[in-house]
Image (cartoon, grey):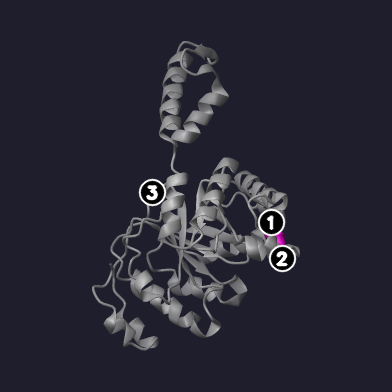
Amino acid sequence: MIFNSLDFIENLSINERLNHLGSEKKVPATKKLYRSNMMLNPLKLKHLNRIDDLEADMITLNLEDAIAPSRKKEALYNIALFLSHLKESKSFIIIRTNPLDEGGKEEIAFLNDFAFDAVRVAKVKSKEEILDIDRLLNSEKEIHISLETKEAFHNLATFSNIPRFTTANIGILDLLTSLGLPQSLVQHDNPTIHHILSRFLVDAKIAGVNPISFMFQEYNDTESFRKWCELEKKMGFTTKACMGPLQVTIANKIFSSNQEEIIRAKHIKHVFEDSAKKGENGFMDDKYGFIDEPIYRDALLILG
């Protein structure tokens, strides 16, 4: 926990919270294995107080659609207060802002000097908006986007060559609305949803960013959530949006590398590199059959 007690914060007015900012600057996250991305509401002080000790690989502090307009300032100041007292966190910390022209620019400017790892801007439509974020945001932080519009879905593959733009999160419900499709399509066996997820993943990879699959909002339906994770892993996803610790536990388990895959990849790396020194890049291996350079590169991907 960041604070031993939250009583003093709850008794402060919104503006008074800025008088209690600390001077802590957590070190930037170094973890590269991102399996779970848990959304937190910064109006929930008990939840915010635990961002130093959660099992989620990523934590997103949400300023957008879950926060009523009348309380966005309160949520913003809460984030500032807790970040300024955060000494360390196991998680990669992200701030989800409102769209740039709906308060996002001001939110980025206000939070720029606090210690967090990335900003995630909602409802992005174009590469020009990402370039705007690149100009606004302090250089040590990553850029993430929420892909929720048909324009961004259509153009994602072209959003390349922005070095610190690293991650796209698909907001499936908003995207369906933007496409004029009903949200009832979100079923495990629906071919339209399979197509949307597959295209999102491939286009994100073309752009050179990590695609994070959507948040399943039926928090207590862990079996359905598990099925979504298993399906998305088969598709090639490595990270899943999560609503809380129960979903985080499932996502972390499913999206972890299989130990057998790691053993196989290490063996392939070793024997290929040994064979390459002898000038042979394609050969039969007693354990795993034919190995050549594409199989070697896949092993490196797994180990990376």
Q: Are marks 2 and 1 in contact (CB under 8 Å)?
A: yes
Which quadrant is home to the C terminus? Answer: top left
Q: Position of residue 99 (x, y in %)?
A: 59, 71
Residue that numbered label 2 is attached to? 178
At x 56% / y 64%, what residue is drawn? 133
Q: Position of residue 10 (x, y in %)?
A: 33, 84
Instruction: Say the numbered circle drawn on residue 108.
Output: none
Q: At numbered mark 2, what does the secondary structure look like: helix, strand or loop?
A: helix
- The one nearer the camera, 43 or 23, is 43
- Kind of residue at badge 1: Phe
At x 47% / y 34%, what residue is drawn? 302
- Please provide the residue range marked out in magenta: 149-153
Q: At numbered mark 1, what does the secondary structure look like: helix, strand or loop?
A: helix
State how far apart marks 2 and 1 are (Cα).
10 Å
Pointer 3 local density, CA inside 10 Å: few below 14, some 14–19, many at least 20: few
Magenta residues: mostly which secondary structure? Answer: helix
Residue that numbered label 3 is attached to? 31
Tell me the quarter of the picture where residue 78 sits.
bottom left
At x 42% / y 22%, what residue is drawn? 267
- Residue 91 lies left or right of residue 167; in this view the side is left
Residue that numbered label 1 is attached to? 153
Q: Name the N-terminal-most of marks 1 and 3.
A: 3
- The one nearer the camera, 10 or 275, is 10
Q: Name the N-terminal-most of marks 2 and 3.
A: 3
* On screen, residue 303 above or below 222: above
